[in-house]
Structure formats: C-alpha cells, structure tokens
Image (cartoon, grey):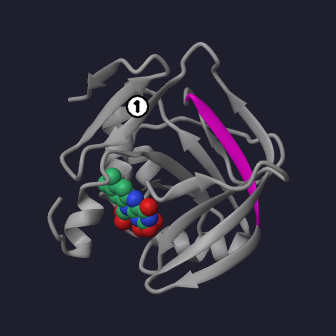
Amino acid sequence: MQKLEPDQAFWLTAPHIYTLVTSLDVHGKPNVMGVSWVTRTPFSPPLMLVSIGHTRYSHTGIAEHQEFVIHYPSREQAQAAWLCGTLSGRDGNKIEKVGLELIDSQVVKVPTIKHVTVAFECKLISQLETGDHTVFVGEVVATSGNPNKAEHLYDTADKGLFALDQNGKAKFCD
Ligand SMILES: Cc1cc2nc3c(=O)[nH]c(=O)nc-3n(C[C@H](O)[C@H](O)[C@H](O)COP(=O)(O)O)c2cc1C
C-alpha cells in the first residue's frame, strides 16, 4: 500500500457503472446525459440518487421539472451513450445527434430511451448540495427493461466504455 492523493485514489475506483439520465429542459424538450455517480438507496421505499454537476444543462431541467429517468444502456448503445457524456444539450438536440430512440414513459413526462437494459422512472423527492454537484434523490415510480439483455456499460477511467454481463463476461466497445 502507498499513500495516495485523493484524485489518484478516486481514479483507482474505476471502472464505474455508466448510466444515461433523461430529463426535460427549460423549454420542455428532452435531453440526456451520461452519469456514473448513481446508486440505489435504500431497499424500501425504492429510491435512487444521481450526482449532477451544477454546470450541466440537465441540472436546470431536473431542478425545474422534478423528474428524471435513469437508464442502464445496452452494449449496442455504447457509442451513443459515450457521446451523451461528452456533448451538451445546451448546444442542440443531443438525442437526435447521437441517434437514440425515445418512447413515452409509463408515469413521468420525461421520456424513456428505447432498447436499454433497464429504466427507472423517478420523481424528485429530495436534493442535497455537495460542493459543485447536487445529489438528486428520486422515488422510483415505474420501471421497464429487457430481462434477456442484462448487460451493462462501465467506464474505464475516461478511456471509453466496456460491457459486462451478469456472468462477469466483459466485452470492449469500440
Ligand atoms: C464516463 C462519464 C461519466 C460521467 N458521470 C457524470 C456524473 O456522474 N455526473 C455529472 O454531473 N456528469 C457526469 N458526466 C459528464 C456529463 O455527462 C457531461 O458533462 C454531459 O455533457 C452533460 O450534458 P448536459 O450539459 O446536456 O446536461 C460523465 C461523463 C462521462 C463521459
């Protein structure tokens, strides 16, 4: 073991699960961003949290509309998913640009991304300011997914994404 700077220590925690979060912007238009700071909390009631930077275009939309959908994208969506974490919806319609398909959600107004492994529709119930990010806590009000496609994307310390299935089989994505 050696003494590490916090940034180096955080870098060592990669890979992280990589999700896509949809929201509505201030004009009511759908947007999507890549989020790896995400987790379920607690067992009951079903709640999930995401940590969103203050500078993200999605931040304003989530705070305004109080709804978001968390998606675990599939391997075929890796390229589009990566772009969602590098482009901003502030500069145009990101969803159209990256070629993701949207469908109506079951409960919330924010749309769900089609063909993902699993999607959690959330209503904002609480938020916590943590430095330059806000932790948004959502109650899961509806879920959908593809049980035959349990494959998730992980980020490799900023070098890209790889997919991992539930048997631990990894596949790198171009
Ligand atoms: C691998 C990866 C993980 C990311 N995780 C987060 C995150 O947890 N929270 C966050 O605020 N931004 C995260 N981002 C950055 C946003 O996805 C990125 O700034 C995006 O352009 C924001 O889009 P928006 O401006 O349309 O909201 C991540 C990006 C990548 C590539």
Can residue 133 be seen here? The reply is: yes
Main secondary structure found in the magenta portion: strand
In the rendered image, the residue lying farthest to the front is: 1
Q: Which residue is mark 1?
A: 77
The part of the image, by quadrant, that contains residue 155 is top left
Image height check: is 41 above or below 3? Answer: above
Residue type, numbered disc 1: Gln
Q: Is residue 127 above or below residue 144?
A: below
- Is 20 on the left-hand or right-hand side of 141? left
Q: Is residue 82 within the magenta segment?
A: no
Residue visible at 19% across and 66% down in the picture: 8
Q: From the viewer's perspective, is 162 left or right of 140?
A: left
> From the viewer's perspective, is residue 75 above or below residue 129?
above
Query: Is ligand 1 within 8 Å of the beta carbon of the residue shown at mark 1?
Result: no
**4 sits left or right of 140 in the view:** left
Work out whether residue 99 or residue 64 is closer to the camera in this orientation and state it: 64
Please state the quadrant of the image where ligand 1 appears. bottom left
Q: Residue at x 81, y 40 (%)?
A: 106
